[in-house]
Image: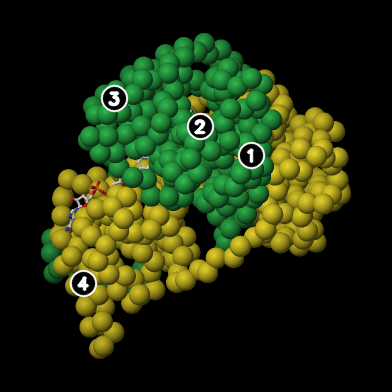
Chain colours: A green, B yellow
Amino acid sequence: MDILTCVKRVPNTGEKIVLTDDKQAVDASGLGFTVSPHEECAVEEAIQQVEQHGGTATVLTLGPEDASDELVTAVARGADEPVLLEAPDTSADPMATADAIVDYIESRGDGEVPFDVLLFGNESADAGNYQVGVRVANALGLPCVTGIKDIELEDTTATAKREVSGGWEVFEVPLPAVISVKEGINHPRYASMRGRMQARRTPIETVEVDLAGDERFEMVELEVPETEAAEAEILGDSADAASAVVDILEELEVL
Amino acid sequence: MVLALVEHVEGEPLEESLQMLTLAREIAEAEGESVHGVAFGDGVDGLTDRLEDAGLEVLYMVSLDGIDRYAPIAWAASLEQLADETDPAAVLAAGTDRGNEVLAHIGARNDLPVVANCLSVEVGETYTLERQRWGGSLIEHARLRAGPKVMSVALHELPIESAGSGAPTVESFTPELTEVEHLVTVDRFEESEEEGISLTDANVVIGGGRGVGNAEDFDKLEELAELIGAAVGSSRAAVNEGWRPHDDQIGQTGAKISPELYIAAGISGAVQHMVGCKGSKHLLAINTDPEAGIIQKANWAVLGDLHEVIPAITEEIRRRQGE
Ligand SMILES: Cc1cc2nc3c(=O)[nH]c(=O)nc-3n(C[C@H](O)[C@H](O)[C@H](O)COP(=O)(O)OP(=O)(O)OC[C@H]3O[C@@H](n4cnc5c(N)ncnc54)[C@H](O)[C@@H]3O)c2cc1C
Ligand SMILES: Nc1ncnc2c1ncn2[C@@H]1O[C@H](COP(=O)(O)O)[C@@H](O)[C@H]1O
């Protein structure tokens, strides 16, 4: 099984999101970066499937040179081949992003898709466009399933399950296929310090991409929504507060 | 005209779809046009009754040859064929798993931009809109110029309003599908055994985070939950530690809860956690750190060790019940 997993680098925001002065991006200084939990799970899934079936786990990101850190993390976890599609930043729209990924895939095959499975996150953490994987699938003429939380691969088919209220919808699709996954499909392993040191030595295939932005959709600016600052009433600082808590439960009639 | 995908379960429209119709009607009104709904599968009778006040002029009931379950590409192809006939200004769906997936296919197949999780739209030649990013912790202001405008609507942000319009005219529609459009369908449904009260239905949710410290001490939360009929949830940190299954996770990449009361114990209040519980009517935080971000977002706080506070609450309830 040759598997390509696409991950997007995003700021590792925590308690608060702070924007840059021009409101065009999240101020990432001092935060560090990560990828969506869905994509962490996609990488883990690729590694597990390759462990089970053999093959290679290629991991790809489109972004600036620094975004290769996320590739190093994936390699430290067990991915084989890192690919950087180098662009000025990660703000490309989903159409341009999908185009660049499709171009790369086509450049590697002679008219055939050189992977059995293309894994994506269900949605990117920052933009949440819910579409790059679907666009790649359509451009390559591949079947596509999204929101998947269980994958079984056989020689020529994938069985993929999507969680819905009360159970699971089961899809069977021929390979090669595009599958976007959700967190919970597996439990991603940590990258060890040693793994990370070794991963830094793995050469990264770097391809510069030229992104033609789509002018039909245009971001104006970002905004942090106002949250009403609730003035929390402090009920106490120890087990003695229990009585006040139960008073509230009674008041809310939830007992 | 605005074409709107109305999802339903056996004739009962999804709340999310009814919320979406609020925005669909707004857009249609500004465009000086009407809303046409599109629904798949059986349950026609019930559905038209339930959509009595939804402001739909027409409801297309689509039946798919040889497909009786969800099929993303066939759904997309059906909406496209209806759009060819009706030339809509916009195509809308709720930002559910299905809605976002079907719209993404429409965008991909027709080279159109797709804007996910919209909150508001100002109609004009160019649409000026607001949409959610970061799972709802950020708002993006944007402009959309393409035609038709393909947009999904953010979940649980808009009210469900009655348009008092009377029942829609029902029209049956059967699209012509190619073999490829038949390819991806749900082959079968597997039921899961749900035990206990689900996070999304519970009246009270007790969430535990890294502050719980280990898997065993979640028993303290479970004991209280059982006593008051609550559900236990957790932060991603507790899931990553392996203390809880991912099913329990609340947040951007987990469950979205809306209980009467959320008790967050040993959880710091990261934005990605808070977007999962912002539907809660009341928030009580239990945290040793008075500076923890969650305290600012809570109605009440106990600034103490959850390992002592939670069992004390359980004990106090038992004591009062014993009286
Ligand atoms: C793209 C993305 C998506 C994410 N999605 C999610 C998501 O869906 N859900 C989610 O939860 N997180 C999510 N996260 C992670 C999130 O950013 C935080 O890392 C996480 O929520 C922190 O969990 P926590 O509050 O349990 O841990 P911490 O931040 O470590 O907080 C622990 C808290 O416990 C308190 N504490 C410690 N000991 C005690 C004690 N004995 N008694 C009482 N209090 C105590 C501490 O004071 C502290 O406030 C996501 C992150 C990213 C980047
Ligand atoms: N810049 C990028 N580089 C690599 N993969 C990406 C990038 N942007 C999006 N993706 C992939 O596409 C998925 C869906 O993204 P989106 O359509 O933005 O929600 C993500 O979960 C990633 O797997």
The number of numbered discs placed on residues in the rendered structure image is 4
| Three-letter code for the amino acid on which mark 3 is drawn | Arg
The amino acid type of the residue labelled 4 equals: Pro
Q: Are marks 2 and 3 on the same chain?
A: yes
Q: Chain of mark 3?
A: A
Q: Are marks 3 and 1 in contact (CB under 8 Å)?
A: no
Q: Quadrant of residue A229?
A: top left
Q: Secondary structure at mark 2?
A: strand
Q: What is the three-letter code of the residue carrying label 2?
A: Leu
Label 2: few (<14), some (14–19) or many (≥20) C-alpha neighbours in 10 Å: many
Crowd band around label 3 with a 10 angstrom C-alpha radius: few (<14), some (14–19), many (20+): some
Image coordinates for residue B253, horizontal then vertical, percent: 43, 46
Query: Which residue occupies 46% across, 12% down?
Result: A208
Contact (Cβ within 8 Å) of mark 4 with mark 1? no
Residue that label 2 marks: A4
Mark 4 sits near ligand 1, with its Cβ under 8 Å away: no
The label on residue A175 is 1
As drawn, the label of residue B260 is none
